[in-house]
Amino acid sequence: MLSPETLERYRRMTPAERFRLTMEMTEEHLRDLLKRNPEEVDRWFELIRQENDERNRRMLEAIARSKEQEK
């Protein structure tokens, strides 16, 4: 999770600055990814999928709770 300061810094960036940062990070991580063997890459993507699934589950639970409170 990002700190409030980091989030604020990102909010103040122009779209061009955010895009440049995104491209720099993508390039850096792509280089690292290409150095790894396929099993490591598969494990890395599986971890990302698991983290995304968990985050989505928590968001859906929070939405369901908020809809229950509206009733």
Image: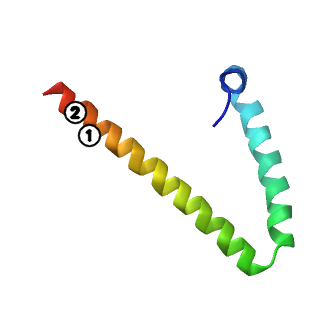
Q: Residue 41: image x %, image y %?
A: 72, 72
Q: Is residue 61 left or right of residue 43?
A: left
Amino acid at pointer 1: Ala
5 versus 68 height, above or below: above
Q: Residue furthest bottom?
A: 38
Amino acid at pointer 2: Lys
Question: Which residue is drawn at the image coordinates 18% and 26% (left, top)?
Answer: 70
Q: How is the image coloured?
A: rainbow
37 versus 30 height, above or below: below
Question: Which residue is drawn at the image coordinates 68% and 27% (left, top)?
Answer: 3
Q: Quadrant of residue 36?
A: bottom right
Q: Callout 2: 10 Å neighbours few (<14), some, many (20+)?
A: few
Name the image quarter holding the C terminus: top left
The kind of secondary structure element at disc 1 is: helix
Q: Residue 14: image x %, image y %?
A: 71, 25
Name the image quarter holding the N terminus: top right
40 versus 24 height, above or below: below
Q: Callout 1: 10 Å neighbours few (<14), some, many (20+)?
A: few
Q: Quadrant of residue 67?
A: top left
Q: Residue 45: image x %, image y %?
A: 63, 66
What residue does disc 2 label? 67
- Considering depth in this image, is 14 or 71 the residue closer to the camera? 71
Do tag 2 and tag 1 residues touch (Cβ < 8 Å)?
yes
Question: Which residue is drawn at the image coordinates 43% and 49% (left, top)?
Answer: 56
What residue does disc 1 label? 64
